[in-house]
Image (tube, rainbow, N blue to C red):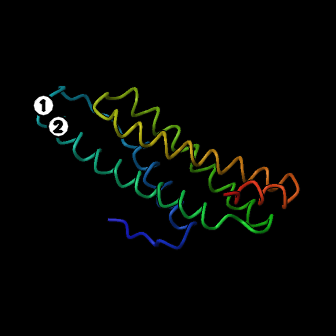
Amino acid sequence: MITLDHNNLSENVKHAYNLSEKFNKESRSKITLGSDEHLDIISQNTEVFNQLIGILSLVNNLVEKNFPSDKQEAEELKLALHSLHSSLDLFVNKIKVSDSSYSESVIQLEAETAQIVEYINDINDFILFDEEFISDDFFAE
């Protein structure tokens, strides 16, 4: 079981990335749909997906609360989020084609992943353009 640090963004990005990569590397054996083995796998995978969704939600909240204040920090965070997004994209696409039993998890994962993409774009704008322009837009109420 992963212990989450609710204040450490980089550790949570690593946890999410590792969980996604672990699933991406798992081999798929042929099992009979609806069998006990199939239902056990669905149950186990759903638990992993829920953990991942929770970590991603925390990552997104931490990015929102701790938007980078300097360009070096922003570059590092952008690279980490890009790596995470790449792994998540592969992960979600693999789930979609492997089994329709996870449709609710896929919807939630896609929502969290879309938020990560939005933060990547915001951070990229921060790096490329005037800091005041981005921070005013990002923190507008």
Q: Is residue 86 above or below residue 52?
A: above
Left or right placement of residue 49 versus residue 10 in this view: left
Q: Could you tell me residue 126's position as x and y percent? A: 79, 56
The quadrant of the image that shows the N terminus is bottom left
Q: Residue furthest front?
A: 141
Mark 2: amino acid = Leu
For label 2, the crowd category at 10 Å Cα-Cα, with few meaning under 14, some 14 to 19 and many 20 or more, is some
* Residue placed under numbered mark 2 in the picture: 39
Q: Give the crowd class for mark 1: few <14, some 14-19, many >=20 residues within 10 Å.
A: few
At horizontal 50% and vertical 54% (from top left) the residue drawn is 17
In this view, the residue in front, 135 or 24, is 135
**As displayed, is residue 103 above or below residue 72?**
above
Is there a contact, CB below 8 Å, between mark 2 and mark 1? yes
Q: Quadrant of residue 75?
A: bottom right
Q: CA distance from mark 2 to mark 1?
A: 6 Å
Foreground residue among 117 and 45:
117
Q: Quadrant of the C terminus?
A: bottom right
| Amino acid on which the number 1 mark rests in the picture | Ser
In the image, what residue occupies the spot 46% across and 40% down? Answer: 91
Q: Badge 1 is on which residue?
A: 35
- For the point 17% across and 26% down, the residue is 32
